[in-house]
Image: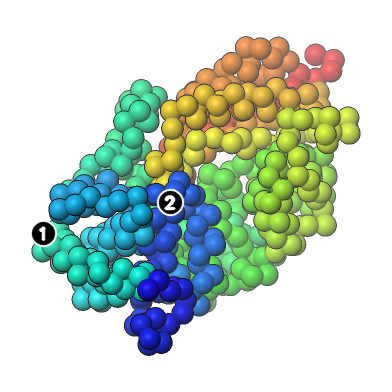
Amino acid sequence: MAVSASGPWKGGAKQQPGVQTRVLAAKVLAAVIGRGRSLKAELAATLPRLDDSRDRALLEAISFATLRRRSVYEQALRQWLQKPLGPRDGELKGLLLAGFAQLDALELPAHAALSATVEAARALGRERQAGLVNAVLRRAQREGFPAARAEDAWPDWLLEQVRRDWPAQAEAVFAASLQPAPLWLRVNRQRHARDAYLQRLREAGIEGEASALAADAIRLPVAVPVASLPDFGEGGVSVQDLSAQQVADALAPAPGARVLDACAAPGGKSAHLLERDPALRLLALDVDARRLQRIRETFARTGVGAAAQVRAVDAADLGAWWDGEPFDAVLLDAPCSATGVVRRQPDVLLHRRPGDIDALAAQQARLLDALWRVVAPGGVLLYATCSILRRENQQQIAAFLARTPDARIDALPEAFGHGDAGTRQRLPGQQGGDGFFQARLVKAAADA
């Protein structure tokens, strides 16, 4: 009998420790692998069902580890199951894969992992398959899994694209993309000096390292729950990758400038700009009205909400929102393939399709052309993506410059990654940051 993962089962008996976490992991993985759902969205909806922060951390760890090693685990299932799983067996498959990840990638104590995962099969209403789950996991425990190449996780078409774009760095990209990402913090300079916050971390028993690449960045060698970070709830510090933090330096708006963040959700980059200069006149847009609440929550927690306006609108539809007053600085953190953040979103490799790249490139070009019209003469547009594909990045900017006579590149320094015709690309794991592309475009002054 299927029951709620959060309630009792089997005649009212309480679940043994860890069963609920495995049940929810199976459901998350079934949604992501079987129904094309976003891992980020599924975890956001599921994690609040677990009261204990240790259980939430385990659910995340199981989900990420499973997706990173999915190709190996699915091959093992094909070899070890006499009969392939059917379309209605998504949760059973998710549970088996989660069991593999516990024994393999996470190296959890085998007895506890086996016992809780088998009981999770019963809690999912799979009493008849509990023996199968036990047998398959015990075989995995005995035989282990073959060593996998990092590139095996990537679909063939995307693998070849990365190799064409980055022939000398491709293998390092594949390897780095399947490693857990470090925890980067952004210190809110309205609340703390970075050195002072480092001292607060040390007093809390947390080791942190300042980065020379971004003035507000701290890297934690060992990740900790955000709730344990001093002053996190009050907005004194935020979680933000190194590459994303460098956007504020790349855009570098003048004090009190009129600034547009055209694709702003969840609001971290806008908040960073306002933490640096609360006098900025900032407008944050996002096409998805449901994501506006995330922006508002970010602004409220960091204390910058009073300085910004937030609107739900397609930034390329100027008639729907622009009042005709130009902006001194525009940030276009464009929709993209997310191929630079696979280590944070491993389901990208599962969901991305070849046709997506052309569609995304067309959307990026549409946004670039429209938003260039709102940039003031002498102003700046920073084009950024979390992609590593040249079609979305270097080639996109080259095409824009070719059709836009009043645009020129203002080359960013070496600290922003690999240089190419004035643009900058950080590859996954390079200097500890995510894969990220930036191009700083300057509009000719009116008297030029």
- Residue 384, disc: none
For the point 43% across and 74% down, which residue is it? 3
For the point 54% across and 62% down, which residue is it? 45
Q: Quadrant of the C terminus?
A: top right
Amino acid found under the numbered disc labelled 1: Glu
Question: In the rendered image, is residue 376 in sight?
Answer: yes
Secondary structure beneath dot 1 equals helix
Residue 351 lies, in percent from the top left, at 43, 40
Left or right: 419 as drawn, with respect to 264:
left
The front one of 174 and 90 is 90
Name the residue beneath numbered marker 1. Answer: 143
Amino acid found under the numbered disc labelled 2: Val
Q: Residues within 10 Å of mark 2 (few under 14, many from 20)?
A: many
Secondary structure beneath dot 2 equals helix
Residue 217 lies, in percent from the top left, at 55, 54
Instruction: Relative to 410, say whether 133 is above or below.
Output: below
Instruction: Relative to 159, say whether 65 is above or below.
Output: below
